[in-house]
Image: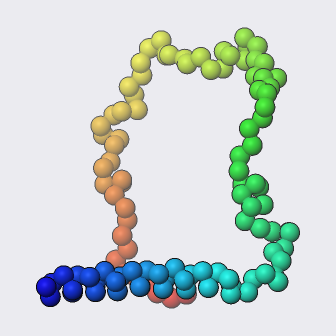
Amino acid sequence: MKATNYTAAKNILKSIIILTGIFLLQINTLLAGNEKSIPSEEFSFNSLILILSPSTPKEADFNDAAMTVSDLTILVPSVPAEADFSDSDPATISITALAPATPTEADFTD
């Protein structure tokens, strides 16, 4: 019997807390006090959204895509007739030159 009374009391307490929270939330929105302040028309969140949102044209305009055949020859890749491996001489490659230089002392003067 005690367990059911305890559970019922716990449920009643939960419902009272929930109803009190809902009541206080409604009172809070009624007494917010922002009825008199008018937001400025110069800058608002909605205008910011409209400014930053991308605009899509209703019709596509392909006037700038008119290219001639001579313009397209620039895009064709060129392959050399003969491979040249003269720049890959192992004697000229220095791995130590790739390491970052660290100073021996730190200079803290401005």
Would residue 73 be found to the left or right of residue 16 on screen? right
Q: Residue at x 83, y 77 (%)?
A: 38
Q: How many marks?
A: 0
Would residue 64 be found to the left or right of residue 16 on screen? right
| Viewer can see residue 15 | yes
Q: Residue furthest front?
A: 1
**In the image shown, does 45 or 22 lie closer to the viewer?**
22
**In the image shown, does 33 or 57 lie closer to the viewer?**
33
Q: Residue furthest right?
A: 41
Quarter occupied by residue 8? bottom left
Q: Where is residue 78 drawn, in percent x and y?
A: 55, 17
Q: Is residue 25 above or below residue 52?
A: below
Q: Residue at x 37, y 61 (%)?
A: 100
Quarter occupied by residue 60? top right
**In the image shown, does 71 or 106 lie closer to the viewer?**
71
Q: Where is residue 19 drawn, in percent x and y?
A: 47, 81
Q: Residue at x 68, y 87 (%)?
A: 31
| Viewer can see residue 64 | no
Q: Quadrant of the N terminus?
A: bottom left
Q: Is residue 39 above or below residue 92?
A: below
Q: Where is residue 84 drawn, in percent x and y?
A: 42, 22
Q: Quadrant of the C terminus?
A: bottom right
Q: Is residue 70 above or below residue 95?
A: above
Q: Residue at x 54, y 83 (%)?
A: 23
Would residue 86 be found to the left or right of residue 79 on screen? left
**Colour pattern of the rendering:** rainbow
**In the image shown, does 45 or 15 lie closer to the viewer?**
15
Q: Where is residue 77 drawn, in percent x and y?
A: 55, 19
Q: Is residue 55 above or below residue 29?
A: above
Would residue 21 be found to the left or right of residue 45 on screen? left
